[in-house]
Image: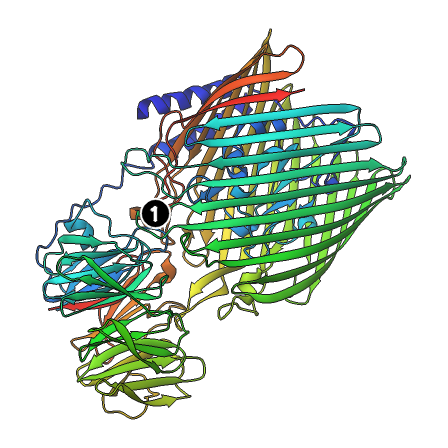
Amino acid sequence: MKLKNLYLGIIASAFLFASCSSDDDTPEVEVPLGAYENGVFILNEGNFGNPNASVSYVSNDLTTFQNDIFKLVNPSIVLGDVAQSMTFSGDKAFIVVNNSNEVEVVNRYTFKSLATITAKLENPRYSVVLNDKLYVTNAISNAVTVYDAKTYAFIISIPLNKTAEKIIAANGKLYVTNGSFGSGNEVTVINTATNTVSKTIPVEDGVNSIEEKNGNVYVLCGNKTKSKLFKINTSTDVATSFESTTLTNALNMDIEGDKIYYTKGTGVYAINLAATGFSDTALFSVKDNSWSTFYGFGVIDGKIYSGDANAFTSDGTVTVYSSTGAVLKTLTVGVGPNGFYSNN
Amino acid sequence: MTLKKRFAFCLLLLCQILLAQNDSITKLKEVVVSDSNLKNFSNTQSVQRLSDSIINRNQPSLTSLLNYNTVIYFKENGLGMTSSPSFRGTTSQQTVVVWNGININSQLLGQTDFNTISTRGFNSIDVKAGGGSVVYGSGAIGGTIHLNNDLKFTDTFKNDFQVYYGEFNTLSAVYGITAATKKWSFDASFTRNSSDNDFKFVGQDAHNLNGQYYNNTLDAAVGFKINAKNSIKFYSEIYDGERHFSLTSPNATKTKYQDYNTRNLLTWSSSFSKFASNLRLAYITEHYNYFEDINRDGFTSGGVKSFIGKYDIDYELSSKIKISTILDYTKNDGIGSGIGRSSREIGGASLLWKHNLTEKWNYEMSARKEVSDVYKSPVLFSVGSRYNFSDFYQLKFNVSRNYRVPTFNDLYWEGSGNPDLKPESSYQAEIGNQFSYKDFRLTLTGYGMKITDMIRWLPNNTGNWSPVNTDKVTIYGAEALLGWKKNFNKHTFDFSGTYGYTVSLDDRTDKQLFYVPYHKLTGSLSYYFKKFSAYYQIIYTGEIFTTSDNNPKYILDAYNVSNIGADYNFSKKNTFKIGIKTANLWNEKYEALPSRFMPGRNLTIYLNLNY
């Protein structure tokens, strides 16, 4: 009977597909490099809600490259859900894993896991080490939590009662940006001797980057109507600034040498540290991949690293450019490459 | 272990091929269906009915019921957590849930969370594959799921009590009452579902953390026949649920989500010699509270209140031609975190034409045009025909254009919403073959569709996420539905099975859309002997891509899950049934989404009383 044959055919084909589905993806066996210095860590945050964050490594000369180094070195430990940021202190690296409420501590040269900090972490974002203390910003508690950077014991929580995002140390003090995802217009200064807020410095809407250079703290803000760069004198905590209403939505400030780099849209820009205005002329522009082109951005040794999150629906792409925009290397990394950290 | 599973699977398939049969929809005359359009204008598409006996046999969530009985694939974030469908390879927002004829997809999200629909309060649930925007509006692209409270007008007084208790402190209890005369009909039920949901992951030391949930549903339907020509019906549903969202990493912040939804519908039906009219007034509310940290008081919330007015007129032009118009008006008022206060109005008119050319051949045509203050809407249409070659073979054909409008979040989300979004739009065609022989029925359907302007939230290069009309998708596939029933003396076997093959390609990359499996198969075999019954269910889902580039590194493995159960009715006249059920009999380790493991083997005992 024809009918029966037809159905049999469908079932049989289903079976065929079913039985040859798995087991044919035998992964190549990779071994840890053993030494991860003289290179750049690429932090891949992973998908929100899925513990698939990872770290990739590429050597300074771009010849040695390895994905998933945390898992390769520490096969029994899951890095977690949304690796937001990384900071170094001595021979340690601290990886803040946002949605897992963890800070993973590793040896920065071997990448061996040393500890996992979990106490009082509520959606941690960024961290910095100063005087053997680890300071972590938290999005849910709007606080900076403090840990002993050697024993990893929790010490105290400093409430800010407003968004606590990026954090840096300068002149013995902490500077915390009070904004994320395009909102927020303040920087909070924390006195680490008393663990209290010593000053709040108003900046511009869209505060997104902060960095210390030569005793000054630079803060970049960008929104729909303007971009504004603040320079905070860390002795007086008084800020000076300049702005542009033609170059709006500036993001991703990274200071290297005597240059301040930033992006707008698909363009990479640079101005001198001593500049008194923004540059409207891009060093170069990258191909518009429609979205998330500069999900990660960094300038290291004169090379410009860009991380394209590919809309978080597949592995990210890292492209390394020369200062004039020549493509030096293209790498397929983990999901959502959001930052580059030089490990020299 | 694997061998054993494969063996059981083969055995089951063998049964279905050797035996073979039918579950034709027998509609009793005195039953008044809540959605007459489904009955009148779906003759050229495939409709699968899930009766109350099937509903009772499955877990009480709409996800579980449809997962085990239809070709629809579910993206379930762990048992009981948020769950959305992929029907014929389409997205979560392209399947509509229709409650007594009214589209109840969330106005905020554009989709229904299938774990917030409790199934046991409904008399039947119909699954209609393919386009249906002309009648059911936005989102009816992949298919529509119809939740029906049908009213009976015969002298009846019945109480129904069911309680199910299983591992992980999982409780499902339903009390229902049906009372009717020839003039009045009343049907109401209360359902309570709850679970600690703290199962151990198969093959791991970890447990499901923070997965507990509960929900309560009150359903009521009242009908009154004013006279021979007029009747009034009122339907109401209240759903109140709270779910903690299970964690994917052990120290993550615990969150929870509360849903409160109400649905009310008043219907006035009149029928004259050639005219019939149906006025429906519905008031639907949805509300959520999301606690991003259960240890803190703060939460975000939102809701939409919708008023829907629909007026249908059916006119019999001749004994062979039926013409209907539907005029409708919808007003949605939304308020909440992120969207502020916003509202929109939509007016629409549909014209439907049905013509029986001969006893064997009919065709249907319909069209709809909408006017809205927010977006421009295309002219929607559906054209189909059915031909009965013989009692054994029937051929169906349908072409339609359907759409999905942007949601409140898409349009109004603070800082991200895109007011310039266009509706998603689809053209689709299908051919259905239905074979019937005695108690055997097989439906084979092939289809293809093209969807454009798909709305997707993407991170843009100003560091923000925003929805855009971006993707174009080409989908084609085939479905087989099989039903068969056979009696040997006092032994009855009842089999039903479904198989779906789905190719859903992103036109830009030519890759399969992620979270659309190529293959899905379900089967269920029931056996009845006097007052004893037993059943075996199986679901097979093929491997699933989780990335847009179909990277083999991130494929979720295919899985095969079986349930088995048996019960005995101790009462002579009524129902006093005690049963036991084992879910995931072979203790399969599986996940429908990455890192969202589902429970291993677990046991449920149940009691059904019907007096």
Pick the front one: B111 or B131: B111
Question: At x 61% / y 55%, what residue is drawn?
Answer: B403
Please tell me in which quadrant of the rendered image residue B150 appears.
Answer: top right
Q: Is B580 placed above or below A98 here?
A: above
Chain under callout 1 = B
Q: Is A144 placed above or below B143 here?
A: below
**Would you name the residue on which mark 1 appears?**
B248
Horizontal and vertical percent for residue A93?
16, 62
Please tell me in which quadrant of the rendered image residue B343 appears.
Answer: bottom right
For the N terminus of chain A, the image quarter is: top right
Pick the front one: B95 or B400: B95
Question: At x 55% / y 26%, what residue is drawn?
Answer: B163
Crowd band around label 1 with a 10 angstrom C-alpha radius: few (<14), some (14–19), many (20+): many
Q: Is B528 placed above or below B132 here?
A: above
Residue sitting farthest toward the front: A194
Callout 1 secondary element: loop
Horizontal and vertical percent for residue A239?
30, 88
Horizontal and vertical percent for residue A343?
13, 67
Q: Is A9 placed above or below A254 here?
A: above
Residue A253 in sight from this viewpoint: no
Question: At x 15% / y 62%, what residue is drawn?
Answer: A149
Pick the front one: A289 or A210: A210
Residue sitting farthest toward the bottom: A276
Horizontal and vertical percent for residue B559?
38, 34
Look at label 1 and name its amino acid.
Thr
Give the left or right position of residue B44, taking residue B411 as reference. Answer: right
Residue sitting farthest toward the top: B489
Residue B582 in sight from this viewpoint: yes
Question: At x 88% / y 38%, what residue is drawn?
Answer: B226
